[in-house]
Amino acid sequence: MESNRRNFLTKGLSSAAGIAAASILPLELLGGQGTLTEPIVLPKEKRAAPKDSIRFSVIGINHGHIYGMVNSLIQGGGTLVAVYAKEPDLLQQFTKRYPEVRIAKSEAEIIEDNSIQLIASAAIPVDRAPIGIRAMKAGKDYMADKPGIVTFEQFNEVKKVQKETGRIYSITYSERLANPASVKAGELVKAGAIGKVVQLIGLGPHRMRPESRPEWFFEPEKAGGILCDIGSHQCDQFLYYTDSKEAEVSFAQTANFNIPNYPDYRDFGDMSVRSKHATGYIRIDWFTPEGLGTWGDGRTFILGTEGYIEMRKYVDIAGREGGNHLFLVNQKETKYFDCKNVHMPYGEQLVSDVVHRTETAMTQDHCFLATELALMGQKMAFQLNT
């Protein structure tokens, strides 16, 4: 009887139908190691209060990312002083969240305030670099939402002024810097948990609800384009996890598959990047279906010579609650980490960098290279016919 069953499995699994059927068979029957490990719920760290403090203000609140940026600075030791925004409705929302903030009458009021050490901005993307340039020329450090730069002309000017002034121009690549699973993945990679990293795959799906978006969102000259914008997250992650100090774009392509009312907009883009020792593939889209319980099933796959890591950052469609899921597979075992309690150090590190003139949050070279890759991908992208 046992011999007949083995013959059936051997012959059946060699066919296409058999291969499909194999997916429903127990792993142990096929000789696999089907043991699932217990979840590792990482505990909250007991952390001392930040040692350093700064005074910072905000210019431009056109994207909701500003709230995460401000919160990270406050938690890192910053004191929010003032805000300037042109839009009364956005200003009302902001001051409701931060009732102690002073409303500035002009951008100049903040730029010229010598007591302010850093300016944060989530203005319309095309305005972020000019604000940062003015801030640096006034002797202030700068924290921009991504994309922090949307053209090569802006890029060259920002680099020039940053070098002349020695100020910090930090871009908040939040898919890594503001995500607990991403922070934990960095710790594991640096500890050698998967050997030498040779490839990263970054998937950045988003949900498209055109009626909820401002008009500038659909104008590439203002928003930067899909690869310049969301793609910058993935370029940052490629450089960070592969420890690449130099890189280039191998190919890039974009398309408007499903937004006919905005013919200049692109709702899909992918690109490939490489350094001398690693490769990366990046895919961005606006096709998250309404049936998913969050805005996007963002995933990152980090391949090493001794194992791999997968992050399911915002949702696990296999059924685990919440986000911040990390899976690690190496030569000995498979592990699942619940990362929701992992501390995100970016805000505290940036505050410390402002005070001590260091580069613990992110090196300036890394910040600029991630943006340069995204800009290059956007510029060279082949336009698919749709």
Image (cartoon, rainbow, N blue to C red):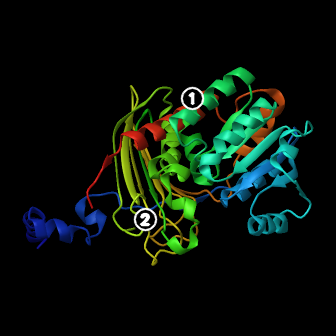
Residue at (78, 43) in percent of width and height: 119
Crowdedness near tag 1: few (<14), some (14–19) or many (≥20) residues, C-alpha within 10 Å: few
**Residue type for callout 2:** Tyr
Q: Looking at the rendered structure, which numbered label has been put on residue 156?
A: 1
Relative placement, left or right, of 245 versus 362 is left
The span from disc 1 to disc 2 (Cα, nearest Å) is 30 Å
Residue 172, image quadrant: top right
Quick one: quadrant of the N terminus?
bottom left
Quick one: quadrant of the C terminus?
bottom left
Q: Position of residue 288 (x, y in %)?
A: 44, 68
Q: Position of residue 46 (x, y in %)?
A: 80, 51
> Can see residue 334?
no
Q: Position of residue 145 (x, y in %)?
A: 65, 49
Q: Looking at the rendered structure, which numbered label has been put on residue 262?
A: 2
Residue at (70, 32) in percent of width and height: 360
Residue at (79, 64) in percent of width and height: 91
Q: Determine the residue located farthest toward the bottom in the rendered image.
A: 291
Crowdedness near tag 2: few (<14), some (14–19) or many (≥20) residues, C-alpha within 10 Å: some
> Can see residue 378?
yes
Relative placement, left or right, of 83 versus 41 is right
Compare residues 86 and 241 and report the one nearer the observer: 86
Q: Is residue 220 above or below residue 25?
A: above
Q: Position of residue 231 (x, y in %)?
A: 47, 48
